[in-house]
Amino acid sequence: MRLFKCDRGGRIVPFSAHRCQACDALLGYVTERRTIRVLLPTADPAVFATDDRDPPLWRCLNSAWGCNWMLPAGSDTSWCRSCRLTRGRPDEADPDAVDAWMTAEAAKRRLVHQLDELALPIEFRSTTSPDGLTFDLVYVPGEGAITGHLDGVVTLDLAEADDRHRDGLRRRLREPFRTVIGHLRHEIGHHYWGRLVGRADDLDRFRRLFGDEREHYREAIERHYSAGDAAWDRTRYVTAYAASHPLEDWAETFAHYLHILDATDTAIAHELIPPDSNQATATTLTSLALDDILAVWRPVNTAVNAIAETVGAPAVYPFEPVGAVVDKLTFVHRRVAALTERHRFHAIH
C-alpha cells in the first residue's frame, strides 16, 4: 500500500488515522481520491471540507468503531463505501463480537482500497444487482460459522479475528499462512471469477491452466480433506488447498496475487526496491508484466522473511511462486488489467 501523509505537515500517517499525531489535524480517507485528507470544520459540526474544495463530506456512521472513511454530505446513506458492503453488525453489548467485527472491517477497508486502486468494479448488492457484492460478518462462538462465498455474499467467521483461534486452525489444517485479509482476498476471488473469467472470452485458457470448473465441487472438497497429508506440488498450486478444485485454485491464486501486489506497492512506497527496478511504480503495476513485478517483489520478500527470522518470528510470506503457479498468477494479472475501466469507476451509488 502507498504511504499516506498529512496535508498540513507532510508527516506519514496510518491508513486508519483519524488524527495526525504531529499537528492534531482531523483526518479522513476520501474515497473519490483514494487518499487521506485533512478535514476542515464548517458551520455544520457534522460536515467537513478539504483544502482542495472537494464537495462537503460526512464521516461514516461507523467512525466511532474505527472507520475513518468519508462520504459526500447529503448522501442517501450514512455509511461509507466499505461499510455499506456489510449487512448488519454485532450487538454492541458483546465487546468481543464488536472487537472482532472492527478487526474484520479494518481488513475489508484495506481490501476495498486495493480493489479501487486496481479499478475492479464493486457492484453493491441491490434489487437491480442481485448478484452484487455484500459481506456477512458472523460471530457465533463455538458454532464454527463457515467462511465462504455464494452468489456475491462473502461470509467471514469473525472467530478468525482471534489470533489464538486462527492459529489453532492453521496448525490443525497444516497451513503455513492464515490471515483475516487472506480470507477476504480469497473469497473476493470467487466473486470476481465470474466477472474476470466466466463472463469473459478466456474460459478455455482458464481450463487449460486451472482445470475444468464444472467438476463436482462438493465431492472435490471432500476428497481434498479425506486425503490427509497428500503431497503438495508447489510447482502446480500456490497452496495445498488450491489443489482441491479449479475454482479454489483460482481463488487462492487471486488472493496471493493481491498479496504480492500489495506487498510490492508497499515496498515501492518505502523505497525498498532495488535501484535498477525504478520502472515499477505503485500506479503502474497493472501495466507491467508479472515477471517484472515478481523481480521487484522476490528480493524484498526474501529480506522481510529473513528479518522475521532474526527476531524469532515466523516468515511473513512463506511462499515462492514457481512453475505453473507463475503462469496462473500471470493469467490473473492479465484478466485484472483487461477489466480496468477507470473512466466509469467511482460513480456515486
Image (cartoon, helix red, strand yellow):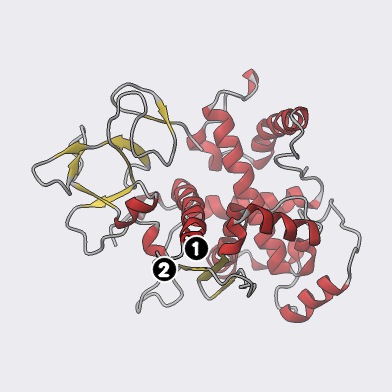
Q: Label 1's element?
A: helix
Of residues 243 and 59, the one drawn nearer to the viewer in this rendering: 59
Q: Residue at x 45, y 68 (%)?
A: 134
Of residues 90 and 322, the one drawn nearer to the viewer in this rendering: 90
Amino acid type assigned to the residue bearing label 1 in the image: Ala
Residue 11 coordinates in the image, percent (x, y) = 39, 23
Q: How many marks can you see? A: 2
Q: Is residue 78 left or right of residue 339?
A: left
**Separation (CA) of disc 1 from disc 2:** 7 Å
Of residues 167 and 239, the one drawn nearer to the viewer in this rendering: 167
Q: Label 2's element?
A: loop
The residue pinned by badge 2 equals: 91
Dot 1: within a 10 Å radius of its alpha carbon, few (fewer than 14), some, or many (20 or more) residues? many
Residue 197 coordinates in the image, percent (x, y) = 59, 65
Evaluate whether residue 203 shows in this view: yes
Asked if labels 2 and 1 touch by Cβ distance under 8 angstroms, the answer is: yes
Amino acid type assigned to the residue bearing label 2 in the image: Asp
Q: Residue at x 59, y 55 (%)?
A: 180
Residue 337 numbered tag: none
**Badge 1 or badge 2: first in the primary sequence:** 2
Residue 190 found in image quarter:
bottom right
Q: Residue at x 35, y 46 (%)?
A: 68
Q: Is residue 15 left or right of residue 59?
A: right
Q: Residue at x 68, y 54 (%)?
A: 164
Dot 2: within a 10 Å radius of its alpha carbon, few (fewer than 14), some, or many (20 or more) residues? few
Position of the C terminus by quadrant: bottom left
Residue 306 found in image quarter:
top right
Residue 145 coordinates in the image, percent (x, y) = 61, 73
Residue 61 found in image quarter:
bottom left
The residue pinned by badge 1 equals: 97
Q: Is residue 240 above or below residue 106?
A: below
